[in-house]
Image: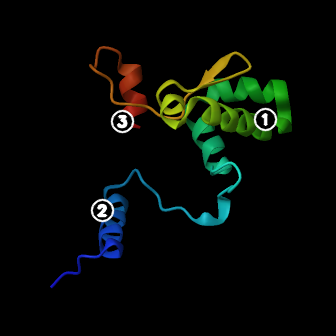
Amino acid sequence: MAQTTEKAFETHAREILLEQGGWKQGSNAGWNKDLALFPDDVVAFIGATQPKLWGSMQEMHGAALQPMIIKTLAKELEIKGTLHVLRHGFKFYGKTFKLAYFKPANRLTWETAIFYLG
């Protein structure tokens, strides 16, 4: 008989997510407790999904970009909340960085579908 514990449920959910792809298991090593973020993962996501914007900001700020953008993100999360930042992104030097891509309402604009579908 299968166990019906929280641990068994979490294990099953993790196995399904890993099998279907698109999700990778992380570790607590990169967790910043004070900011409640995985800074390296945030920077990797932004760099992968918004390379032109990230590149232009790197030209302007150089090596100082990562700590600056994480500090700005943490401040926005504190002020506006997680849902607002996920839905609308956050501003950094007048540019909007997105942290999530949602399924488009239609497929009229193929660019939006590409970001959602990966």
User: What is the quadrant of residue 77 in the picture?
Assistant: top right
Type of amino acid under label 2: Ile
Vertical position of residue 93 compared to residue 48: above or below: above
Disc 3, SS: helix
Q: Quadrant of the N terminus?
A: bottom left
Type of amino acid under label 1: Met
Disc 2, SS: helix
Of residues 108 and 66, which is closer to you in this image?
A: 66
Relative placement, left or right, of 13 versus 77 is left
Percent x, y for residue 111?
41, 21
**Which residue is depicted at the point 32% across and 63% down?**
13
Percent x, y for residue 114?
39, 29
Colour logic: rainbow
**Which residue is depicted at the point 67% across and 38% down?**
74
Type of amino acid under label 3: Leu
Which of labels 2 and 3 is toward the front?
2
Circle 3 Cα neighbour tier, 10 Å, few/some/many (<14 / 14–19 / ≥20): few
User: What is the quadrant of residue 47 in the picture?
Assistant: top right
Residue pointed to by mark 3: 117
In the rendered structure, which disc, 2 or 3, sits on the residue that comes first in sequence? Answer: 2
Residue pointed to by mark 2: 16
Which of labels 2 and 1 is toward the front?
1
Which of labels 1 and 3 is toward the front?
1
Disc 1, SS: helix
Relative placement, left or right, of 38 versus 15 is right
Alpha carbon of mark 2 to alpha carbon of mark 3: how far? 18 Å
**Which residue is depicted at the point 78% across and 41% down?**
67
Alpha carbon of mark 2 to alpha carbon of mark 1: how far? 36 Å
Residue pointed to by mark 1: 68
Percent x, y for residue 49?
54, 33
